Structure formats: C-alpha cells, structure tokens
Amino acid sequence: MIPGKGKDGCLQISQYGRVQMKIGLKYKNEEHIFDECISAGVPFLKYPILEKEGLVEHGISTRLGGVSEGFLGSMNLSYTRGADPAHVDENYRRMAAAIGVKPEHMVCTHQTHTTNVRIVTREDAGKGVTREKDYTDVDGLITNVPGICLVTFYADCVPLLFLDPVKKVVASSHSGWRGTVNRMGQVTVEKMQKEFGCDPKNILACVGPSICQECYEVSEDVIDMFRANFRESEYDRLFYAKENGKFQLDLWKANELVLTDAGIRPEHMAVTNVCTCCNPELLFSHRASKGKRGNLAAFIALKEG
C-alpha cells in the first residue's frame, strides 16, 4: 500500500489499483467492513473480504459522483423515480468506469420484494441498462459468467452480495423486511448450491448499507411475521418493543442469523456498520427522505481473463 494525501487532505491509499478515501460516512462501530474508494471521480464502497480474493469487480454506490439533480442528486441509478433517462444512463457509465465493468454487461433485478432468484447467462447482458428486461419479479441474481455484472437496488433495504471463490460464482440479492422474513439470504445460498454445486462453507457473504435498528420503527404485524419465522431465542436480538406500541427491528442481525442458518461461516461474513438513514446526504434513504429519493445500487462481477 502506498499512502498519500488527496486534494481534500484525506488519507488516500493506493490498493488493488484504486484509491481509498474518506467521504464522511457515519459508522455505527469501528469495525473495518468497508473501504471508501474513489475511481474515475466516483466515490463508492467496497468490501475488503471480497477484494482480497482478487476474483471480482464490485462496489456499492453512494449519492456522490453522478449527474442527477434535486432529490435524485446525484448518483441515482433508477429509471422509475421520475429521473431523466439520459442522466441515469450517464450515471451507469460513470459507475461502470469506476468499478471496472461495462454497462452493456450489466444485468438488473426487477424488485418486488419476492425471494425469486434468477440465474443470469451471457444472453442476459445489458438487461435493465442498455436494453429492456424480459422478466419481472426478480429480487436476486446469480451467475458464473465472467464479466457479467449483477445489479441490485436499495434505499434502506438490505443488499446481500455473495462470492464462492472455489466454484467462481457470484450472487446479489435484495432483502427488505419482506425478503428478510422470508429468508432471502438462505434462498440465494441454496440456489447457489443447487445450480452450481457451491458449498456454503466456502461462500463469502456481505450484508450491505441499509437502515439500522435505531432508525427502523415497525408495527406489530411486521414483528408477528418475524416471530413466526425466527426462533424465540432470537427475538431479543431482533427487536424490542416501545411504549407507543411500535417496535425497533434489526434487519442486520436478522440477515446475519439467516446467513448463519444457511451455513455461512462467521469468518466469511461481513455485516454492515453503515446505516442509510443515518447518512441521508451521502446515501439514499426512503425513510429519511419520506420517499423523495433515488436508488443506490450494488454491483458485482467475476473478473474476465
């Protein structure tokens, strides 16, 4: 690593061919879960646990480095929230250049809070970015095709990224509260096993920036579904009641428990310490913005060659 000072005075470290820097995120603890990076003028987050394998290009976008305006400013990656499509196109080009992939090789989900996971082939390249999708109701993607970049979307919901370095398979899934209570992480791991022969003990799993427990108030009908789908011994780690009859729900812990049940080893797991709602100037948050927001995206692709 070659440390140096950037123009803003932040420590920058040249590692893995990119620059690490501080963009001002607030963290919930001191764990080193993410690297804050900038490449081609675009800030984004990376996982050291994935990067050290040398097998993938990946990143999670922030609100910074794009061309969208107003409440979509500036790195909005959704075409469906009133955005100028030309701005979104340019944002994809910028993210692709930063991460090291091609827009025409990206494949996007069509998220409707399901646990449907699609196997992505080379024939899917570009769907959702450079050409129309021919599928709906897909909240997770898996591929073993080098160069194909899986893209999923967030603004408080939980990103899940997976890498099997043995079988060379990647996956990306969207897990809001509905996906989490229906164990989207486990569904994804089981499909990796079934379709590609992956062994859960080899899979690296990352829980991405999303809403923290302190920011996530829910009603008892939501909690009742978690009570039905998790062990009673886990309740104290998942939620607590408040005097107003509402509950604070921990999606981070819930996804960690789901991934553990799926067979992911603790040392192969990276659980976020970044809350979208605590960082509304840097990350899109549905709750913080009261719905006036763009979308973040998670990107992961097996390296070519």
Image (cartoon, rainbow, N blue to C red):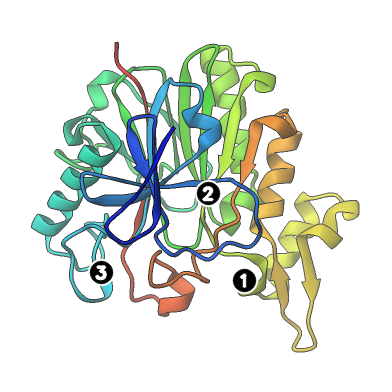
Residue 72 has which mark? 3
Q: Name which of mark 2 and mark 1 comes first in the sequence.
A: 2
Q: Which mark is residue 208?
A: 2
Check disc 2: other Cα within 10 Å, few if <14, some if 14-19, many if 20+.
many
Mark 2 or mark 3: which comes first in sequence?
3
Q: Gap between marks 2 and 3, in whole Å?
A: 21 Å
Q: Position of residue 37 (x, y in %)?
A: 37, 46
Q: Quadrant of the C terminus?
A: top left
Q: Residue at x 42, y 80 (%)?
A: 290
Horizontal placement of 183 versus 261: left or right?
left
Residue at image x 34%, y 42%? Answer: 19
Badge 3 or badge 1: first in the primary sequence = 3
Q: Secondary structure at mark 1?
A: loop
96 lies left or right of 275: left
Asked which secondary structure carries label 3, the reply is helix
Q: Nearer the viewer, residue 156 or 225?
A: 156
Q: Quadrant of residue 106?
A: top left
Between the C-alphas of marks 3 and 1, the distance is 22 Å
- Does any portion of residue 152 appear in the rendered image? no
Task: Tell me where residue 172 appears, x and y as whole percent.
Answer: 46, 37
Q: Is residue 163 above or below residue 129?
A: above
Residue that extends furthest to the bottom in the rendered view of this protein: 244
| Circle 1 Cα neighbour tier, 10 Å, few/some/many (<14 / 14–19 / ≥20) | some
Q: Which mark is residue 11?
A: none
Give amino acid for label 3: Leu
Which disc is residue 216 wearing? 1
Q: In this view of the protein, can residue 47 be seen by the observer?
A: yes
Q: Amino acid at mark 1?
A: Tyr
